Amino acid sequence: MNHTLLPKLTGIILFSLTFFTHSTLLQVNDHSSFTTTSEIGLTPTTVNEECDCPELIINSDVNVEVSNVTEIEEALDQAFNDDGNMTITVLPGTYTLSSNLRAISANMENLSIIGATGNADDVIIKGQGWNNNDVTHIFNVAADFFTVANMTIGEVFYHPIQVHSNPNDADDFLVQNVRFVDAKEQLLKVSGGGALFADRGKILCCEFEFTAGIAYQYYTGGIDAHRSIDWTVAYNTFKGIRSPDGNLAEHAIHFWRECEGTLVENNHVIDCDRGIGFGLGNSPLNGHIGGIIMNNFVHTSRDVGIGLEHSPDTKVYNNTVITDNYNRSIEYRFPATSNVHIVNNITNEEISDRSSGSSGTLETNYETSDLSIFIDAAAYDYHLASNVSDIVDAGTELTEVVTDYDCSPRNSIDIGADEYNVNPDLYPELVISNQNNTGLSSIELVVELKELLDIPTTGLVSFTIARDAHIDFSFDASLTTLNGLAVDNPEWTYDSSNPDFHVFNSTENIEASGISRVGLVLNYNPLNSDGMNNITVNILSGSGAEGNSANNAVSVDLMYVH
Ligand SMILES: [Ca+2]
Ligand SMILES: [Ca+2]
Ligand SMILES: [Ca+2]
Ligand SMILES: [Ca+2]
């Protein structure tokens, strides 16, 4: 299923379709996978069930393919000499470094290094093992707009990736669909030390893991970020970030030392010593400001799931946090941790200020020791197994939380990271034979009604098409095929009584994850003029028990000349 597209793209898609001229079959919808096809075969990766990573934007026309370590080194030399502006496509294979690659120096802006297949397992770049300092890093980054994607990196003495904020600040860093494994220290480090900040980094759809289920020493962690502003950490998985020693490992996700505005959402933390942390201790030099931690599944094995320490104005919304061997799932500590807002979290242990002088507001959190409310807590799957009345629809509505851990829509918000689906969600798509009409013409239009949440509709489903003087049709209730598609007209009735809309009503339920199609042959009349208009289809809110009206409309532009 590929039914989550960034909503902001919808306008672009509709706009671009008007420039397709003679296609015979165009599909228009809110959820399609219309994307720019890249010459290097990038495949968006799905981590959570319905969360798609964004299409990678390649910054340059200069694309160099590499298939061995020497070619990687030569490509990096070229990127250095050309001041960046290059894509290096890494063909499938295992690349074992015997010394560090050239650092990504500040002049090498707009450099992307991307695995060719889109599968992170197909390209492996590794060092000589965690205890051999011949290779300390894979990518050591001081340049702006550096992108790395679609590969596995690790087995190094320090960090698979280090992003610098000093003396050059690497802004707009992006890592996507990368597996970080088996380094001696933190798997991704953002280092501080000067007056500058690394801004707007993004860490998306990655995995951070010690493959033995435990690290080599306590001085390690997942993401360890200093002096970072407005970073996004989303759709990642963290596993086995655990210390073998008495001292704890650092958090799976830790932003501290003058970080600000971090968004941490839709991550899955599994069997780590500590989960998500903003700030550390009681010093502003080690603190964090603001930010949001939401829609995460967090499981820790030795210490806190979510910890705020010297972290004012931080929001902790709709997380599910299970803490083994520790009696606080969420902590907010020290006097500077003020005005925090902790809402709609499910925890198995308490949410506590530790009587440390911190202050904030707690609303509609839910603590339970009964892990049978989850689908499979033993496997760290914290989706709700049933309609628990104190959780489902029992949350506080929050403008920031519009989707859940699965990127499914929220409606009557639940507590915790997973929204339990009790209603189906329908959305429309249009398949149209022709968007350009000269004189009187015929258009074959198929309206598709698709169910998104694997729940069947109950009761009447209704949709409308706005009336338009250019368009006339007669509904054929016996039609079963149109434009190469099977259509379900016998299961629909047409109501012509509304002066503003053509109204269609179903006589059958739409199956879970099913599709029902209505086929129409439209007679199009330009009415002695030239111009553009559109066909707009809208599913009636609540019809068929459908529970999300945000995706119920679709429209397609029509060009006409007389
Ligand atoms: Ca900066
Ligand atoms: Ca709900
Ligand atoms: Ca869900
Ligand atoms: Ca809907």
Image: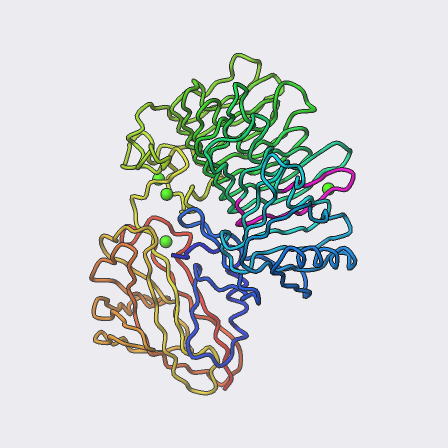
Give coordinates of residue 160: x percent, y percent: 61, 42
Residue at the location (37% across, 81% down)? 523
* 166 magenta-colored: yes
* 57 magenta-colored: no
Q: Is residue 313 visible?
A: no
Q: How many marks are shown on the rendered structure?
A: 0
Residue at the location (44% across, 66% down)? 555
Question: Which residue is more in the foreground, 250 or 338?
Answer: 250
Q: Is residue 287 above or below residue 130?
A: above
**Which quadrant is home to the N terminus?**
bottom left
Give coordinates of residue 127: x percent, y percent: 61, 44
Q: Quadrant of ligand 1?
A: top right
Part of the protein shown in magenta: 161-179
Q: Is residue 337 above or below residue 206?
A: above
Left or right: 30 as drawn, with respect to 336 = left
Q: Is residue 23 above or below residue 66?
A: below
Q: Report which quarter residue 373 is drawn in.
A: top left
Residue lying farthest top? 355
Give coordinates of residue 37: x percent, y percent: 54, 66
Question: Which residue is more in the foreground, 52 or 160?
Answer: 160
Q: Is residue 22 above or below residue 37?
A: below
Looking at the picture, the colour scheme in use is rainbow
Q: Is residue 136 visible?
A: yes
Give coordinates of residue 497: x percent, y percent: 28, 67
Residue at the location (57% across, 14% down)? 357
Question: Which residue is more in the foreground, 385 or 528?
Answer: 385
Left or right: 302 as drawn, with respect to 455 = right
